[in-house]
Amino acid sequence: MQGFFRSYLSVYRPLIHSLNRLLQPYELSYSLWQVMVYLHEHAPVSLVGISQHYGIEKPGVTRRVQRLEELGYLSCAPGNDRREKSVALTEEGLRIYSECRGKITALERQATAGIDATALKQTVAVFGQLLGNLK
């Protein structure tokens, strides 16, 4: 089906722009937010775990974790292996996560307004299949 990627990208870019604008008052970007989401769902976790989950090189994850630590949103502790860090959200990070999560949920509701719930579920399933095909 020609045009699928073009249609996807025509939605992706404005969505990321909207997310970044929403997250900016917290000194966050979508890439930093991804780390916070993963930590909220899996903490404590190693940088390698984050890297593998998102398919991001470890240096990129390290930079994101360092920035979130500077903001006071996460803390690092030595892992089982001396070469590895274990990271988790701080109380402030949990508070910011909760606040941003509410705003992002509102944005999602706005963006999906008027779209049938079945169609949305099918779209989510298709995205899952696409991801599987690309891996």
Image (tube, helix red, strand yellow):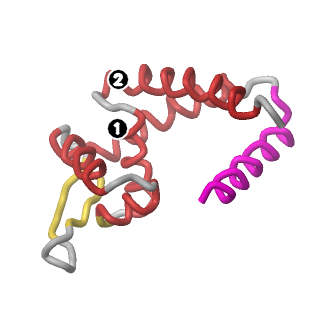
Which of pointers 2 and 1 lies earlier in the amino acid sequence?
Answer: 2
Q: Which residue lies furthest to the front in this view?
A: 2
Give the crowd class for mark 2: few <14, some 14-19, many >=20 residues within 10 Å. few
Residue 9, horizontal then vertical, whole percent: 62, 28
| Quarter of the image with the C terminus in it | bottom right
Q: Is mark 2 on a helix, strand or loop?
A: helix
Instruction: Examine the image and state in which quarter residue 117 appears.
Output: top right
Residue 35, horizontal then vertical, whole percent: 37, 49
Q: How far apart are marks 2 and 1 (CA)?
A: 12 Å
Which region of the structure is painted magenta? 115-135
- Write down the residue under mark 1: 96
- Write down the residue under mark 2: 24
Magenta region includes residue 119: yes
Q: What element carries label 1?
A: helix
Residue 32, horizontal then vertical, whole percent: 35, 40
Residue located at (59% from left, 29% from top): 12
Q: Main secondary structure of the magenta part?
A: helix
Horizontal side, residue 66 vs residue 116: left or right: left
Instruction: Examine the image and state in which quarter residue 96 appears.
Output: top left
Residue located at (46% from left, 60% from top): 53
